[in-house]
Image: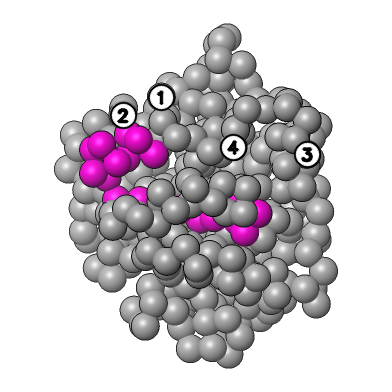
Amino acid sequence: MAVDRRALALALVLMLAGCGDPAPRTGPAPAPGPSRSRIAEAGPAPSVEKAVMPGTVEAGEQPPVVQHGPRDVKRVALTFDADMTDAMTARLRRGEVKSYANLRLLGILEQRRIPATFFVTGQWAEQYPEVTKRIVANPRFEVANHSYEHAAFTGDCYNLPRVKPADMTEDVAKTFRVLEPFGGRQTRYFRFPGLCHDRAALRALAPLGVTVVDGDVVSGDPFARGPDPVVNAVLSQVKPGSIVIMHVTEANALYTDDALPAILAGLRRRGLEPVTLSELLAG
């Protein structure tokens, strides 16, 4: 089964705006709908070349946009977004949610020695510095950029508040500055909030020498009503070279940790090896 990316993203955005609540850990699991990318016209994706840091391209060039890695190698990249917005921070302060950091998920990855790439917003790293240190301390993990406060870079992105065009470059640069002192395996990969981007947004990032990473497998873990829809969404779409999008933001994605063991087992049955994004694209 595929996933309706627009419906899932819209549900997540409503929650980020404080207009919805995560699904409870009870009740029937909805079946994912048909897959549809929500990416504005960006033109063909240039090829990706490894540079000084993974994901680095020459500053001044329009960033390449990556959907997946090579299809002729039986590897996949598990990526986990760490979203954080002003509304989410406010909910934490009011005690409406317990945590946006899924420590059990990290524990599963650590115990099973599974490589992973974390797309971290600047605000999430500031909210959870100790968890960020834990991530970067693991040699099997690498860190990428997911903007500073998960605002939209286009005018039509699921009602997310929009970054002003003049502020787009600084928003991403600020996040790199926040992440840099943590060390670890830093990259120049960037993922747009909501996967929304157009030519103007890509041009704004040209001075930063980044590679934009979307992904071809949307897990649907935000607002899932149980682990099974997440497992089914990933295993029904995954293939050699896939980039899987999941979340480490516990209150927004309650069942990702429960789904992860079954996802890993399904990948093993297919002979697909999890690797970091850098390792996948280098292949």
Range of residues picked out in magenta: 106-124
The label on residue 100 is 4
Q: Which residue is mark 2?
A: 261
Q: Could you tell me the amino acid type at mark 1?
A: Asp
Q: Closer to the camera: disc 1 or disc 3?
A: 3
Q: Are marks 1 and 4 in contact (CB under 8 Å)?
A: no
Left-right relation of 128 to 228: right
Element under disc 4: loop
Q: Is residue 159 magenta?
A: no
Q: Mark 3 or mark 1, which is nearer the start of the sequence? A: 3
- Estimate the x, y position of residue 165 in percent, counting from the top left: 79, 73
Number of labels in the image equals: 4
Nearest to the eye among marks 2 and 4: give it.
4
Looking at the image, tell me whether mark 2 or mark 4 is earlier in sequence order.
Answer: 4
262 up-or-down from 190: above or below: above
Q: Earlier in the sequence, mark 2 or mark 3?
A: 3
- Which tag, 4 or 3, sits closer to the chain's start? 3
Residue 90 - label: 3
x and y percentages locating residue 86 in the rendered image: 77, 47
Mark 4 burial class by Cα count in 10 Å: few <14, some 14-19, many 20+:
many
- The answer to whether residue 139 is left or right of residue 234 is left
- Amino acid carrying label 2: it is Pro
Q: Secondary structure at mark 1?
A: helix
The reply to whether the C-beta atoms of the residues labelled 2 and 1 are less than 8 Å apart is yes
Residue 126: percent from the left, percent from the top? 62, 54
> Taking 52 as reference, is 10 above or below it?
above
Residue at horizontal 34 percent and vertical 79 percent from the top: 50
Instruction: Measure how far apart labels 2 and 4 are at the Cα level.
Output: 20 Å
Q: CA distance from mark 1 to mark 4?
A: 16 Å
Residues 42 and 165: in front is 165
Q: SS class of the residue under badge 2? A: helix
Expressed as whole percent of the image width and height from the top left, the position of residue 72 reads: 22, 60
